[in-house]
Amino acid sequence: MKKAVIWLSLSTPLLAAPWIQPFPLGSITTSRPAMGAYFSSEIDPNSIDFVIDGRSWKAEAGKQAGRWALSPNYDVDRGRHLATFSGRTFDGKPIRKDWTFTIQEAANLEFTALFPAPGLSGPNPPRVGASLNAPVSAVRLEIDGKERSTQGGEGAVFHQLSQPLAPGLHRAFIQVIGLDGLVSEKSWTFQVQ
């Protein structure tokens, strides 16, 4: 009589680790940024503490399912700030996320005109971009969320359209870095008939 050995492999699905997505990150030019974090459903929202530069904002943070945020009604000091988001999961495991962000001085660079003009309804424009009051060192231009090549001339940076845009509403976004290293950006919508 032969004996058969059968191996059973039982597997349990691995649970995703709790995640925290903080904001803002890096350097920003707005003086009143929303500060906080999105977090996964494994984190107990009643255990959370939100600290910026050593001060707890637990009581003042705006709380929603999966999101805690502080929207200051004052100008945040320029410079680097340390933020900490901590708490525990529903099964008692501690979680913590530290990050930094920097408030930079707003650039003196200004957009003197956007083209096509915001809200403009008309035929396809020949180009999309902006006129500037000073030279820049770098440009990022997006049309409908896609980055486009740019060229400059006559105090403006723009994308020369090689094909017409489809009729409807379009969104443009431009970000420029001035020669002083400071960032300016603008977004607008325009209508093509």
Image (cartoon, grey):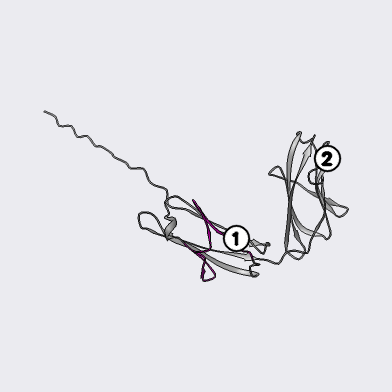
Q: Which mark is residue 125?
A: 2
In the rendered view, would you say 56 is above or below 170?
below
Compared across the picture, whether 114 is left or right of 28 comes to: right
In this picture, which residue range is highlighted in magenta? Answer: 49-73
Q: Amino acid at mark 2?
A: Pro
- Residue 140 appears in view: no
Q: Nearer the viewer, residue 142 or 43?
A: 43
- In the rendered image, the residue lying farthest to the left is 1
Query: Residue drawn at (19%, 34%), measured in percent from left and top?
Result: 5
Q: Disc 1 and disc 2: Cα gap in Å?
A: 38 Å
Element assignment for label 1: loop
| Image quarter of the C terminus | top right
In the rendered view, would you say 136 is above or below 54?
above
Where is residue 180 drawn, in percent x and y? Answer: 76, 66
Q: Amino acid at mark 1?
A: Ser
- At label 2, counting other C-alpha atoms closer than 10 Å, the crowd grade (few under 14, some 14-19, many 20 or more) is some
Compared across the picture, whether 85 is left or right of 102 comes to: left
Query: Residue drawn at (82%, 47%), measured in percent from left and top?
Result: 115
Q: Kindly indicate the quadrant of the structure image that contains residue 48.
A: bottom left
Q: Of label 1 and label 2, which has the lower sequence position?
A: 1
Q: Kindly indicate the quadrant of the structure image that contains residue 164.
A: top right
Query: Residue drawn at (84%, 40%), measured in percent from left and top?
Result: 126
Q: Which mark is residue 82?
A: none
Element assignment for label 2: loop
Where is residue 145 drawn, in percent x and y? Answer: 68, 44
Queried whether the magenta region covers residue 56, the answer comes back as yes
- At label 1, counting other C-alpha atoms closer than 10 Å, the crowd grade (few under 14, some 14-19, many 20 or more) is few
Q: Which mark is residue 71?
A: 1
Queried whether the magenta region covers residue 70, the answer comes back as yes
| Image quarter of the N terminus | top left
